[in-house]
Amino acid sequence: MLGLLMLGLLNQSFPTKASRKRWIEINNQILNALFTLMSTYQHPVLFHHMFMLCRWRSEDIIELRKIYCKNDTHRPNEWAHMVVVVILLHITCLAQYALCGVYWCFNRFKRPEFLEYLFIALGVAAPLCAGVYAIYGPLGREYESNVNDECKTRMNANGRRTLVNDPQWIGGLFDFFGDFPVAYLSCCCTCCVFGWNMERLGFGNMYVHAVTFLLLCFAPFWIFNVSAIKVHDYVIGDVLGISGIVLCVFGLLYGGFWRIQLRKRLGLPENRLCCGSASFTDYLQWLFCWGCALAQEVRTGNFYDVEDDSLCRRLSRKHECRSLMDGLGSDIGSNTLSLTTEEEKEQSAPMSVATKEDGVEDVSLVVPPVQPLMKVEDEGEVCIMLTARDGMDQRVLPLVKVDIIVDNLHRAPL
């Protein structure tokens, strides 16, 4: 409609110049609200990309290459090229915010046209330059990398994980009384719990998800209602205000979208209750019962571990301690058996001991006795006994059951 008005194709419907300018202003305010909303949604991701560029760790390099580099491969001077693209995208968002301030702070009679056209030009030119540079620049060209990139090496700290072939949702959709704290936090602190759960399941940064979810659920109401005040039309203003509220409710669909990604990537079972569509059912679950859906996802994340886009059986702390004790036992056994023959001979060799009594030095030869080790039970306690030369048994090392050690480690933090 704005294009038709500016081209003069609606002059018959709006014969007077004042009516045409009024409707041009209404369209400008609506479009300004929409573009500001889209920039607000994208900006948390751009801030995270800039943060990763400043930090520039191995995991950041892999993630940024997936977004900005063709075929996810190494490029010469890739950091500088990525910085150029990210800065241009930041300029796009900042230009839209500045344009929004011009539309909200000045009416159409006092609005400076130079600032309006300047920010419109920046908002159009910056993303075009970023797209052209990313596609046709060094980041978008074919490049063969012969560098053995160490950051692609992935190590599994625990080799005893068991992949789950048929994973299941833990509990039903309304089975939130089994873990009431999770259900309570999922309902009352949805954005924070959602972001935390997405990050630990390998679906992005926690803060980006939390801030984006907040913006989706609250930004439309604020932006559209301010724009409704600036259009100076009661009917259109009411329509804009209601549209903002509806968009806030539809912000819950963000959780439904990531529930679909979670289900597909990890192989969780589908629910085709609504219209025979699993995706539509996931959206409706988040739209009408977001707390129950999020609690179910959190319970599933608590039960499994995610490795290489697959769910693995999570070991309990008792089993982890048992594995640790087994490893320590094997190390101790190997170290005990690694005594050399020279050490044994040195320990069993005769020793000369010099004593001095009344000014006369007496040198005597002492032969160390053979001291066997015996495993005995003393008053219900299993221990290691050493038999001395005089025949007296001496307790050396009490033996404690491994289960007792594991239980104690389970109670205390490692």
Image (cartoon, rainbow, N blue to C red):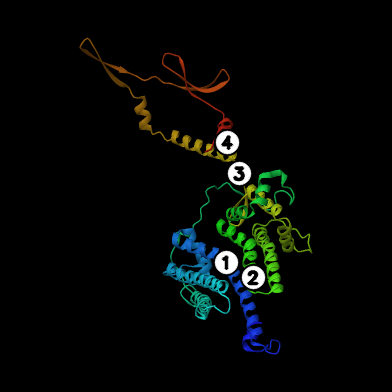
Q: Nearer the viewer, mark 3 or mark 4?
A: 4
Q: Are marks 3 and 2 in contact (CB under 8 Å)?
A: no
Please tell me which residue lies in front, 134 or 112: 112
Q: Which residue is mark 3?
A: 315
Q: CA distance from mark 3 to mark 2?
A: 57 Å
Which amino acid, mark 2? Answer: Ile
Which amino acid, mark 4? Answer: His
Which amino acid, mark 1? Answer: Thr
Q: Which mark is residue 377?
A: none
Q: Which mark is residue 40?
A: 1
Q: CA distance from mark 3 to mark 1?
A: 41 Å
Q: Are marks 3 and 4 in contact (CB under 8 Å)?
A: no
Q: Which residue is mark 4?
A: 410
Which amino acid, mark 3? Answer: Leu
- Give the structural element (helix, strand or loop) at label 4: helix
Q: Which residue is mark 2?
A: 229
Please tell me which residue lies in front, 31 or 341: 31
